[in-house]
Image: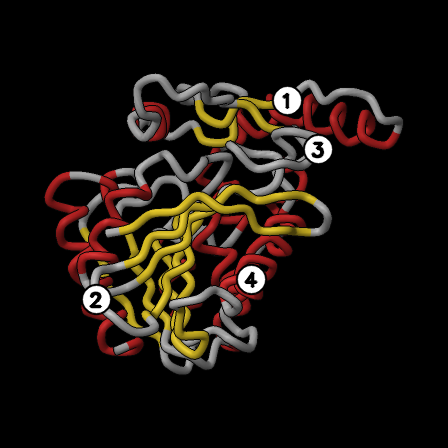
Amino acid sequence: MEQTELTVPSHGDPLAATLGRPDGPGPAPLVIMAHGLGAVRDMGLAAYADRFRAAGFATLVFDYRGFGCSGGQPRQWLSVRRQLQDWRAVLAHARTLDGVDPDRIALWGTSFGGGHVIRVGGDAGVAAVVAQCPFTDGLASLRALGLRSTLKLLPAAFHDTLAALVHRPAAGVALVGPPGSAALMTAPDAEPGYRALVPPGLAFDDHVDGRIALQVPLHAPGRAAGRVRVPILFSVCEHDTVAPAGPTLRYAARAPRGEVRSYPVGHFDIYSGSAFEQVVADQVDFLRRHLG
């Protein structure tokens, strides 16, 4: 199966992406893929992309602006608005690719990216959506984070907000940490689960601009589920300590063509082992039914 590195323009910056083509002739359906909170495409997405290509789908996996191998400044600025722009730029570019059927393009996002694909899933040119352990409700995630960690995050969040106004460097906040620490994810399974996704030798920055801590409580992409008119699969982790399952299930019920698959695992368990095998099999089945 052929893989090609390419760049996709997004608002003046190049996004790094990997295009994988399945064996076989003719235009193929395509699955566009991106990761979650501060993560990059090298962190566990290849296993999913390999299975999709083996099932006959092309894959296009990309890094957001300011992260991984993509361009864009400032680095590590996790902006919801910018990342939604990147999804739409990649979708528009994908429709021009040779060997891709522009009428059979699916979006696949996990965690924070799972919330993004719910928002973008209502756009023209999307045939299906997979939202994996999706971040759907900021207030629910804030409650899961806990008061202690929230209070510890606020100084850096306000500092980086003011620093951006006067064009000064951000102090940054940690993506993951132990319970009660000043990090964006502090559940007992968060730090070991997140770090297990980082492959050996990857130079990975585990801090992001603190401004995101002020955006999270206001960000509820699950509210857009009712506007997604195409088939959308919600792959839900029942014991999710980062993106609680309850709000996700309530939002999923609003999707006119929504499907739900629930798994008795935590947020980080679905990238490997038996949980991965079950999840990816269900997703391949969904994509085959709706993309052909």
The amino acid type of the residue labelled 2 equals: Gly
Mark sitting earlier along the chain (3/1): 3
Badge 4 amino acid: His
Residue 128: quarter of image: bottom left
Of labels 3 and 2, the one closer to you: 2
Q: Are marks 3 and 2 in contact (CB under 8 Å)?
A: no
Q: What residue is rendered at 31% in x and 38% in y?
A: 44
Of the residues under marks 3 and 2, which one precedes in the sequence?
A: 2
Please tell me how crowded label 4 is: few (under 14), some (14-19), or many (20+) other residues with Cα within 10 Å: some
Decide: is 275 above or below 88.
Answer: above
Q: Position of residue 182 (x, y in %)?
A: 54, 21
Helix, strand or loop at label 1? It is: loop
Query: Residue 229, relative to residue 31: is it above or below?
Result: below
Decide: few, some or many residues near mark 3? Use Cα within 10 Å; few <14, some 14-19, many ≥20: few
Q: Which residue is mark 2?
A: 24
C-alpha separation, residue under disc 2 versus residue under disc 1: 46 Å
Assign a secondary structure to mark 3. loop
The C terminus lies in which quarter of the figure? bottom left
Report the residue marked by disc 3: 73
Q: Which mark is in front, 4 or 2? A: 2
Q: Amino acid at mark 1?
A: Gly
Numbered badge on residue 93: 4
Expressed as whole percent of the image width and height from the top left, the position of residue 65 reads 61, 41
Q: Which residue is mark 1?
A: 172
